[in-house]
Amino acid sequence: MLHTPIKIQYGTDALHFGELSLPQSSGPHPVVILIHGGFWRTRYDLSLMSALAENLAQQGIAAWNIEYRRVGDTGGGWPNTLIDVALACDFLKTLAIEHHLDLQHVVPVGHSAGGHLAFWLAARPRLPQNSPLSYTTSPLPLTGTVSLAGVVDLKHAWQLALGNGATAELLAGSPELLADRYTLASPYELLPLHVPQVLIHGDRDDRVPIEISRRYAEKAQALGDTVTFIPLAGADHFVLIDPSSKAWQTTIEEIQRMFHDTYHTL
């Protein structure tokens, strides 16, 4: 039987919290940061990822399922949505000793808009120090990062009007008006990330087209990053966060491979 997830505040806002699911073993536990999607809007919350957190803990991986301010919340959108996710990630430094977390093995896994945020976490060392998104000079190092049907290219998402203008809502305008924001917030613009990246995407996705992941992977590989692009035949947008699906089993295998590769290089 698993422990009930522990709700923990990582900051001062009511939405600065996450749920930590721990394996039964003594640890230290590798960690997956789960980041839910929903086009950065307040309608969706971390419950989208709760079943995945339980599944990870069953397999010996601690899951830090995070909430953050979204468009529609007080203070949500640019820049706080991104800063909140960064705060939640770095808060693992505070949680590590008490909860036996292995900070040498941390992988963010995000779905949809959460895939954008997971890859952006890996891109933080690329941000200029005077950026409004650079609240710290020492972001938590990551083993790698995984995008599940992620919106990893914000300019492309804006061009396609994904989520009925969700990208413009997040950044409060278009790339023409706010070029700097798109450059600082979009993983595609911040390549190369210099950590392993996995993009898993269904070819039947009608919310975020697979071409976004494919185009991202091509650029990342051309710039020398270690990138794995896994197209899933017949998969839609939401099967990727069904813990009983073959798609999620593929994700687990990629996470375990990242951890395994790192253990053997330390």
Image (cartoon, rainbow, N blue to C red):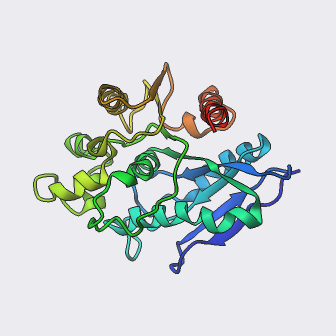
Residue 29 visible to an observer of this rendering: yes
Residue 83 as seen in the image, left or right of residue 6: left
Residue drawn 11% across the image and 58% down it: 177
Examine the image and state in which quarter residue 169 appears. Answer: bottom left
Residue drawn 16% across the image and 59% down it: 178
Residue 17 image offset from top left, x and y in percent? 59, 69
Residue 54 image offset from top left, x and y in percent? 73, 48
Examine the image and state in which quarter residue 248 appears. Answer: top right
Residue 61 image offset from top left, x and y in percent? 72, 45
In the image, residue 229 sits, relative to residue 31, either above or below, namely: above
Residue that extends furthest to the bottom in the rendered view of this protein: 12
In the image, residue 220 sits, relative to residue 34, either above or below, namely: above
In the image, residue 65 sits, relative to residue 143, either above or below, namely: below
Examine the image and state in which quarter residue 210 appears. Answer: top left
Q: Nearer the viewer, residue 152 or 246?
A: 152
Residue drawn 30% across the image and 41% down it: 188
Residue that extends furthest to the front in the rendered view of this protein: 266
Quarter placement of the C terminus: top right
Instruction: Count up the numbered dots.
Output: 0
Residue that extends furthest to the top in the rendered view of this protein: 233
Residue 265 image offset from top left, x and y in percent? 62, 34
Residue that extends furthest to the right in the rendered view of this protein: 1
Q: Nearer the viewer, residue 125 or 38?
A: 125
Residue 166 visible to an observer of this rendering: no
